[in-house]
Image: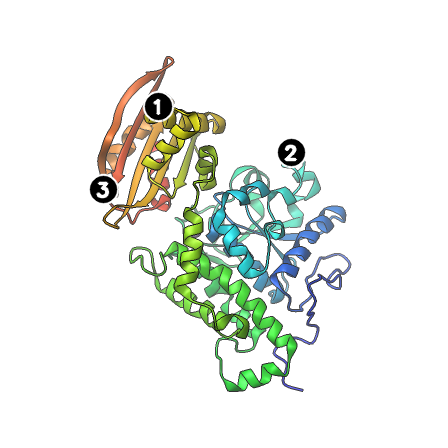
């Protein structure tokens, strides 16, 4: 027999096993498994935790639930569950995508990517797999949980109200909100600048993943020879390569296929190299894998939002904050305002595009009950240049002062330049004072990661 690359308990079936269920604590079998089987198992573990009052560790991404958040949580949970640190709270880490299940359909890039990892939307663990927010506290006791945050560093929303004290670790590339202590014991506290959070997760998991895989990063005749002798090893390589593709997709999307000089860091280039090596050492994938083709496939899926309703486009990549009792919401849209106008005009069946799109934004704002609503667009100009538009709309007196302050304070840093028909005066809407303005944001390196803190600062 060849030296085993994997522990002897390896399961090669696609079915989760129950052997990890022991008295008291839910444990994942240390066996290697496919992502598909892992997710099925992790999902069932939530039910077990509820039914038998057991401990559970969640790995959760941010509320915009973009590709980066989804893959960060999965990559971390997948590797960490198979190589948990000693004396850990639980051996199993359950990755949660921070949206209801219906939100997956709004993310065509998810639908394009998941088959590469041999999973389907229903394998993802979403908020719908947790108890209803009104009863979750009694079904999953806070003291029975631990939360690892990826792609954000403060647990938001209803979950934040109940479980903030139970945050045990974080890996993120947003501004540090200093919400929890420096010492996180055996869990990470990594907050660094990087194009993609998935790059930081990859870096963090690398050592453990290598131990699991033998030396999967190096290829060569010796390995090939050895692998032929072991179906289990070949299976593990495929599973690793599938997960690697998930991670790679996020990093490529976040760095424009490693072309975006403003965003890319050493963490990203190294993570891409590492993940790509995992893909290339899998015989089933290496022959036909082409990074640029892969990037283009996911990127065009992401931009293919023409089939979505405008309200869905606005909530597709959306984040919300409470700042001194005021509610701020920011929608990121991968198409320009011009597209939003035409879309709104079409849906309302009217020629008056300006009124139609403003009406749609107003409706979104009302549904979310916002004081301040911002839309950030990204697009490519006819000359092929990456560009950003920024719309800020204030609906209350406090928000109006904040918006004016933001306009003055952030003008230089963001390179704000008046947009045609840009507004910028207060006006009455059915007796309510409002303020709205649109800019070109010429300093395009600044994403919501920077714009959100600037807006929040102006509100405080
Ligand atoms: Mn991110």
Using the numbered discs, state the Cα–Cα distance from disc 2 to disc 1 in whole angstroms: 38 Å
Q: Assess mark 3: CB under 8 A from ligand 1?
A: no
Closer to viewer: mark 3 or mark 2:
3
Closer to viewer: mark 2 or mark 1:
1
> Horizontal and vertical percent for residue 209?
54, 69
Closer to the chain start, of discs 3 and 2, is 2
> Horizontal and vertical percent for residue 236?
60, 71
- Image quadrant where one finds the N terminus: bottom right
Residue 278 in sight in this render? no
Using the numbered discs, state the Cα–Cα distance from disc 3 to disc 2 in whole angstroms: 44 Å
> Horizontal and vertical percent for residue 217?
48, 75
Residue 342 falls in image quadrant: top left
- Rendered view: 399 above or below 267: above
Q: Residue at x 50, y 68 (%)?
A: 206
Closer to the chain start, of discs 3 and 1, is 1
Question: Which SS class for mark 3?
Answer: loop
Closer to viewer: mark 3 or mark 1:
1
Q: Is residue 276 toward the left or the right of residue 91 in the image? A: left
Q: Are marks 3 and 1 in contact (CB under 8 Å)?
A: no
Residue 129 falls in image quadrant: top right
Using the numbered discs, state the Cα–Cα distance from disc 3 to disc 1 in whole angstroms: 27 Å
Q: Residue at x 54, y 64 (%)?
A: 242
Residue assigned mark 3: 415
Q: Are marks 2 and 1 in contact (CB under 8 Å)?
A: no
Question: Which SS class for mark 1?
Answer: helix
Residue assigned mark 1: 355
> Horizontal and vertical percent for residue 166?
58, 48
Q: Residue at x 65, y 37 (%)?
A: 132
Residue assigned mark 2: 134
Label 1 crowd (10 A; few <14 / some 14-19 / many >=20):
some
Q: Is residue 11 toward the left or the right of residue 197 in the image? A: right
Label 2 crowd (10 A; few <14 / some 14-19 / many >=20):
few
């Amino acid at each position: 027999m060849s030296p085993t690359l994997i522990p002897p308990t390896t399961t090669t079936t696609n079915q989760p096993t129950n052997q990890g269920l022991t008295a008291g604590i839910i444990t994942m079998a240390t066996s290697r498994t496919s992502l598909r089987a892992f997710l099925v198992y992790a999902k069932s573990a939530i039910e077990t935790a509820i039914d038998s009052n057991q401990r559970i560790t969640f790995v959760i991404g941010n509320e915009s639930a973009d590709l980066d958040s989804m893959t960060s949580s999965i990559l971390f949970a997948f590797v960490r569950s198979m190589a948990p640190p000693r004396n850990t709270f639980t051996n199993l880490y359950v990755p949660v995508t921070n949206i209801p299940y219906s939100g997956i359909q709004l993310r065509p890039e998810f639908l394009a990517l998941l088959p590469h990892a041999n999973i389907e939307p229903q394998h993802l663990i979403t908020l719908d797999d947790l108890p209803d927010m009104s009863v979750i506290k009694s079904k999953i006791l806070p003291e029975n949980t631990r939360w690892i945050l990826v792609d954000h560093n403060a647990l938001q929303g209803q979950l934040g109200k109940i479980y903030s004290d139970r945050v045990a670790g974080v890996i993120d590339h947003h501004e540090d909100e200093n919400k929890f202590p420096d010492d996180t014991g055996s869990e990470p506290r990594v907050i660094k600048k990087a194009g993609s959070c998935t790059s930081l997760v990859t870096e963090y998991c690398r050592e453990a993943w290598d131990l699991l895989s033998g030396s999967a990063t190096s290829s060569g005749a010796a390995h090939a020879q050895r692998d032929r002798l072991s179906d289990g090893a070949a299976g593990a390589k495929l599973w690793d390569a599938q997960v690697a593709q998930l991670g790679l997709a996020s990093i490529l999307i976040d760095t424009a296929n490693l072309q975006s000089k403003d965003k890319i860091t050493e963490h990203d280039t190294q993570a891409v190299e590492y993940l790509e090596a995992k893909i290339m050492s899998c015989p089933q994938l290496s022959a036909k894998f082409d990074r640029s083709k892969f990037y283009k496939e996911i990127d065009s899926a992401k931009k293919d939002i023409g089939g979505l309703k405008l309200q869905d486009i606005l909530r597709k990549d959306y984040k919300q904050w409470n700042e001194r009792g005021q509610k701020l919401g920011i929608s990121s849209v991968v198409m320009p305002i011009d597209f939003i106008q035409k879309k709104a005009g079409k849906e309302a069946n009217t020629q008056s595009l300006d009124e139609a799109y403003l009406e749609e934004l107003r409706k979104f704002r009302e549904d979310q009950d916002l004081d301040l609503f911002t839309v950030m667009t990204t697009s490519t100009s006819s000359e092929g240049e990456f560009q950003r538009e920024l719309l800020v709309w204030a609906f209350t007196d406090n928000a109006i002062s904040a918006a004016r302050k933001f306009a003055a304070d952030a003008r230089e840093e963001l390179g704000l330049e008046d947009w045609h028909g840009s507004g910028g005066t207060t006006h009455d809407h059915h007796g309510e004072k409002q303020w709205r303005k649109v800019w070109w944001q010429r300093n395009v390196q600044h994403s919501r990661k920077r714009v959100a803190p600037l807006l929040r600062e102006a509100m405080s």
